[in-house]
Amino acid sequence: MSTDPQHHRTADVDPSAVPAPPLADQLVLVTGGARGLGAAITRAFLREGAAVVINYHRSREAAETLAAAHPQQALAVAADVRDAAQVEALVETAREHFGRPITTVVNNALVDFAFTGDARSRAGEITAAELSTQFSGSVQAPLQVIQAALPGMREAGVGRIISVGTNLFQHPVVPYHDYTAAKAALLSLTRTFAEDLGPEGITVNMISGGLLRSTDASAATPSEVFDAIAASTPLRRVTTPEELADAAVFFASPWARGVTAQNLIVDGGLVKG
């Protein structure tokens, strides 16, 4: 046992002894879970019987409509995940409603970004403020969500943390400099947190898609761009939000109990490795 008062582990856990909770026994938080990819992730977990906390910031109607369709399984909760106090309140509201802690977190929320390549700032124009905006949404927010959920995961003795990344790390074909830099930092945090939290039975992984067909964020993308991407993939089609959502379910499932610190690319084979 560590004598360091800052060290939260009481003992390293034998990974083979850590229970892999069935999806139907999990309480899942999906940030930005009411629209686009987030809604697809929410529906995928609901389909598998999990209880889901649908976090939203501005999409109240969509969140409440989705929750109302699954009254015993889903709860819509407003919170700006960039605000630590709102995140803490979100986690406490979920516990009070379901009577148990959140054990799976999906960091999906995308803050103030649209996939409009021609409209994005180029290398000679991008500002520190643009980078800061994306870092607050893609690094600071997931950090706060993870930290708020950790006590409940420790109480349960198991946890699943899944963050949404991008294949632009490997295939930077469009000038999404701020978005890609922030997601790269989140990938680094994914891997270092996996090392830190693994002995407690908590896995930390990332799922990375390319341009999805279609979400609110990709709605302004010309059809020719989608067609060009499809022609470049072995599957000859553009990945859907539902396909990426299934990968999130995999990482939360018992079948992924031995997988952590990974970045799974789900883009029809466009990017290899």
Image (cartoon, helix red, strand yellow):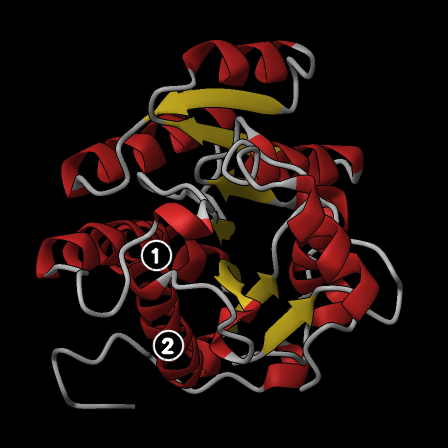
Residue 208 x/y as whole percent: 58, 65
Q: Quadrant of the C terminus?
A: bottom right
258 over 84 or under it: above or below:
below
Category of crowding for the residue at label 2, using alpha-carbon neighbours closer than 10 angstroms: few (below 14), some (14–19), many (at least 20) = many
Foreground residue, 1 or 122?
122
Quarter occupied by residue 16: bottom right
Q: Secondary structure at mark 2?
A: helix
Measuring 60% from the left and 83% from the top, which residue is drawn there?
A: 15
- Does residue 246 show up? no
Residue 240 x/y as whole percent: 74, 46
Q: Which mark is residue 16?
A: none
- Does residue 108 show up? yes
Measuring 32% from the left and 78% from the top, which residue is drawn there?
A: 9
Q: Earlier in the sequence, mark 2 or mark 1?
A: 1
Specify the amino acid type for callout 2.
Phe
CB within 8 Å, label 2 to label 1? yes
178 over 38 or under it: above or below:
below
Q: Which mark is residue 193?
A: 2
Measuring 35% from the left and 59% from the top, which residue is drawn there?
A: 179
Specify the amino acid type for callout 1.
Ile
Pointer 1: what residue? 146
Residue 186 x/y as whole percent: 36, 68
Q: Secondary structure at mark 1?
A: helix
